Image (tube, rainbow, N blue to C red):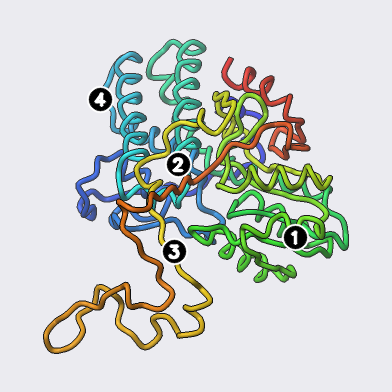
Amino acid sequence: LARIPQLAETATRPPQTTMSSSTTTTDESPVLQDLRRHLTGSSTDSGAAIDPEHRTAVALPVAAIKSLLGVIQRSQANTMMGLQEELRGAAEEMMAFATDCPGSLQLLGGRSHIALASGCELFMKYVTRAYLELPDFAACIAQIMERGERFAGISLAARDRIADVGQAFIQDGQTVLTHGWSRVVSNLLVKAAEHRHFSIVVLEGRPDAAGAKAAKVYADAGIPTTVVLDSAMSYVMENVDLVIVGAEGVVENGGIVNKIGTYGLGIAARELGKPFYVAAESYKFARLFPLNQSDLPPLGRNAAILSFVDTASWEMTGGLVGRPPPSAKEGADGEQVDSSSIPGVVQFKSEQVKVKNPPCDYTPAKYITLLFTDLGVLTPSAVSDELIRLYQ
């Protein structure tokens, strides 16, 4: 938000969306309804999820900021202290939902809540700064709302800026390796394909098949695309020219937090001498300083959800083709289908085998070559300086 005056000239004001309280069918608080609306386009469907191919959808930090703007619109506070208390409560409520609610996994699209925390923290800092610069309460609120309403458009403008600076690093005939789904990375690669001919290798992206979904976007854009298993990253590394990934958060030491597997990808790239680039907006810069994986904040209760399928057996036998799903009734006696009889499904008792499914990992700065941001091309060591400017 501190950079809104510089970016506002290039951004277009998005149309405002109104929400009728009479159409809301959930018991969620208004701030959670707003968060859902900004992320999915629906405030009435509690089961709505992010469409990974919806390239105009707002990023998680932007959704958090726009939700907090809704808090200001509804607020009856007449002092800055009272308003800040309401905003802190709303931010804590969104964070509690992201870390503890079973439905947050679907709403957040399988991502961690680090970007959500970054957006909330950035907005709270901006509110405090705005009041120091403009002590009149009414005038301060008007300025916050006016700049905040432009933030979604600025988010899209940031992606275009990143694409402009990043596509110069892709040359004709090269092969790009990427991991997971990132709107910033997809925008960069699709724009680069307008002027250059290159191919893409995408890791599958277990457990949500994010890479496979991204591959469809690249293929639809006419880019030669190959999907490989996550475990094949080292195998294919010798045949690629560079690696480009997104980030859920860029931390103070220049490292990144991103989809699980990014750390291993960075290690493989460094060992084989391949440049490892990160594309991320500056509002994803987070005041975190992890030294290893255990320093990451708790990632929520959904981290233990994972299923296993022997895809070879599944394909050979047709899987569920021609069969009712396990929850359906079968036969006159109403007996449920036993999911253990489905070919390819691997099952075990939870007390016998533990399951860990972390959504993201931490990649240290030493594995990162450069970062493509809306502030320009940065080295990892420059991130701390930008964070100081952002939060000073």
Residue under circle 2?
A: 63
Near mark 2 (Cα within 10 A), the count class, few <14, some 14-19 or many ≥20, is many
Near mark 4 (Cα within 10 A), the count class, few <14, some 14-19 or many ≥20, is few
C-alpha span from label 4 to label 1: 58 Å
Res. 308 mark: 3
C-alpha span from label 1 to label 2: 36 Å
Q: Secondary structure at mark 2?
A: helix
Query: Would you say the residues marked 1 and 3 are in contact, meaning their CB atoms lie under 8 Å apart?
Result: no
| Figure check: 68 above or below 216 | above
Q: Position of residue 89 (x, y in %)?
A: 30, 26
Q: Earlier in the sequence, mark 3 or mark 2?
A: 2
Q: Position of residue 370 (x, y in %)?
A: 76, 37
Near mark 3 (Cα within 10 A), the count class, few <14, some 14-19 or many ≥20, is few
Q: Position of residue 73 (x, y in %)?
A: 33, 32
Q: Earlier in the sequence, mark 2 or mark 4?
A: 2
User: Is any part of residue 161 visible from this angle?
Assistant: no
Name the quadrant of the N terminus. top right
Q: Nearer the viewer, residue 68 or 14?
A: 68
Q: Secondary structure at mark 3?
A: strand
